[in-house]
Amino acid sequence: MPTLVNYSGDDDFCSGGSLYANPIDSSLLLSLGSHVDVYCPPRKRSRISAPFVFRGDKFLQQKQSSIEVLPDECLFEIFRRLPGGQERSACASVSKRWLMLLSSISQAEICSSKTTQSLKTEGGLVSDESLKLNKEGPLPFSNDTEMISGDDLEVESDGYLTRCLEGKKATDIRLAAIAVGTGSRGGLGKLLIRGSNTSRGVTNLGLSAIARGCPSLRVLSLWNVSSIGDEGLCKIANGCHMLEKLDLSHCPSISDKGLVAVAENCPNLTDLMIDSCSNIGNASLQAIGKCCPNLHSISIKDCPLVGDQGVASLLSSASYVLSKVKLQALNITDVSLAVLGHYGKAVTDLVLTGLQNVNERGFWVMGNSHGLQKLKSFSITSCRGVTDVGLEAVGKGCPNLQQLSLRKCLFLSDNGLVAFALTAGSLESLQLEECNRITQSGVLGAISNCGSKLKALTLVKCMGIKDISLGLPLLSPCTSLRSLSIRNCPGFGSAGLAIAGKLCPQLQLLDLSGLHGITDAGLLPLLERCEAGLVKVNLSDCVNLTDAVVLAMSRLHGKTLQRLNLDGCRKITDVSLVAIANSCPLLRDLDVSKCAISDFGITAVSGANQLQLQILSLSGCSKVSDKSMPFLGNFGKSLLGLNIQQCDAISNSAVEALADRLWRCDILS
């Protein structure tokens, strides 16, 4: 016979559905007065309390049961059994705690799809209703103002997912979100971190999450991240064995230990860039050379602990695959250059900058070792060991050299430049910048003796180049030269320009910007001798040139001219614009900033039906006013960029009206 119990509210009652399997059994409940009479079979006390507790004639509402009461160990087991990446990403949006737990699960610890599918069939693990997920996107964390928003998701680039975190966006939370969100989509392929959040910056914890969740990571770039050290880099090395490119810049907490771990665990490494890492030294470079047989590119800059031992070991170990080498501001000596000259059999691109301890002997040995047979591009900056003897040896030892750039080589003179030109039969491009012992005689001699392959010559800020009087030997013209650029060389004038015109009859690109000394008399002979037809001309800040030059250029080269820069040529007037409008149908880029042009010239240019300008700059033209704006609207079908800054006679209303007509054009005003 059932037992009737007088319930006074001091004990629990059964919860979670009806008390009776059959409605007839409800007769067992006899009365409901001031006390509640309930049929209560003997049972154990419920582990989770009911939402309501009765106290006599009162009842209190308790906090609803939550999955949050489970310890991290239980949540970890639940999360690693979630059926897919979408479910894991949804759970990561609930709270920071769940996100960090999910980011601590490596790919190897996630249960197989068969296991998770069976669990899902039996009742599921965590329902969307219990998590209250937003189907349109992840929710903000309940205890944090930070969101995993759509802006923080990865973009696809170069065939794999790429993510870049800069400044205040670089935090461990975002790295954890990236690790969780990309795991089911093939994983992150490229990660770039630029700077760090000042209060909650990226640490080893965030990088460890990437290592666990993104084993397919191929490219890692860390710039100005002092809070990441060897621990984080070791995690990447142990978890991301497919790493191919590593870029470390201003990372003082990373030492040889972290880089050695990368060398030992990432055999596919092809590109290594180290910049201003004060604790990286020779040991790590030795490990890279020994363990990374596919290394193709190495760049080491401003690392005080790196010396001959590390560089020489790396160069000799990777002699058959290493093709690009950049060494800058290192404490290396002639020994490293000797090793480079002997073992650099595969090197095609070489950059040497700021090597103060390398002398003439180093460059001489490097050239005479005859190991740089495949070298095509060579750039030297601020190396006092570059002398006439050293440069001549380089020319002899590098028969396939095509591009040479010499910057701030203070001990190089005309003799060395001409001797190099005689031996470098494959040279196509020569650039000299701030080589102040080079004179006009040396430049003209190099042009005449470089053979039939030289296509481009660039001279920048060479103070030793000055016009010379008569007495030059008979020089052979260089018919292969297509590009001549002489910029900011104050001593170069009309006499030198006239001689250059005789030596370079096939010019197509001419840049004489910043040459205040040249006049119409020097430039006109050059224009007349250019047989191939000029395509791009830059005469900016040549203040002594007049309309006569533009008239001759339009007449002789109007059918080939595509780009013309006359910025700062104050003697250029509307006469030049009329000539351009009538004779230059292929012109696409015209800059007449700070010239003496007016509305009349703009009207002439805009009225030329054959002219299809894409870029037009009128900056600082004080005589151009609102009257020109309707005529500029005629370029609506072609104009993409218009600069009318510092044109004081143009009103804002006129600019707004013009913008409506030139809706495809970017207007700077």
Image: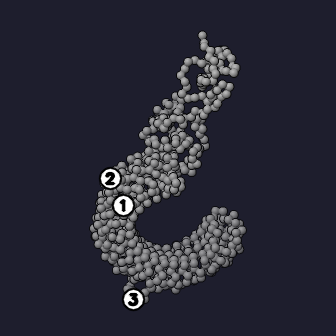
Quadrant containing the N terminus is top right
The residue to which callout 1 is attached is: 323
Q: Residue at x 44, y 84 (%)?
A: 466
Q: Residue at x 53, y 35 (%)?
A: 69
Report the side of 102 relative to 454 (left or right). Answer: right
- The answer to which of marks 1 and 2 sits earlier in the sequence is 2
Of circles 1 and 2, the one toward us is 2
Q: Is residue 154 visible?
A: yes
Q: Residue at x 49, y 84 (%)?
A: 494
The Cα atoms of the two marked residues, 3 and 2, are separated by 61 Å
The residue to which callout 3 is attached is: 471
Q: Residues within 10 Å of mark 2 (few under 14, many from 20)?
A: many
Tag 2 secondary structure? helix
Report the side of 635 relative to 296 (left or right). Answer: right
What's the residue type where badge 1 is placed?
Answer: Ser
- The answer to which of marks 1 and 3 sits earlier in the sequence is 1
What's the residue type where badge 2 is placed?
Answer: Cys
Q: Is residue 165 visible?
A: no
The residue to which callout 2 is attached is: 291
Tag 1 secondary structure? loop
Q: Nearer the viewer, residue 398 or 86?
A: 86
Of circles 3 and 2, the one toward us is 2
What's the residue type where badge 3 is placed?
Answer: Gly
Q: Position of residue 72 (x, y in %)?
A: 48, 38
Which color scheme does this rendered protein use? one colour
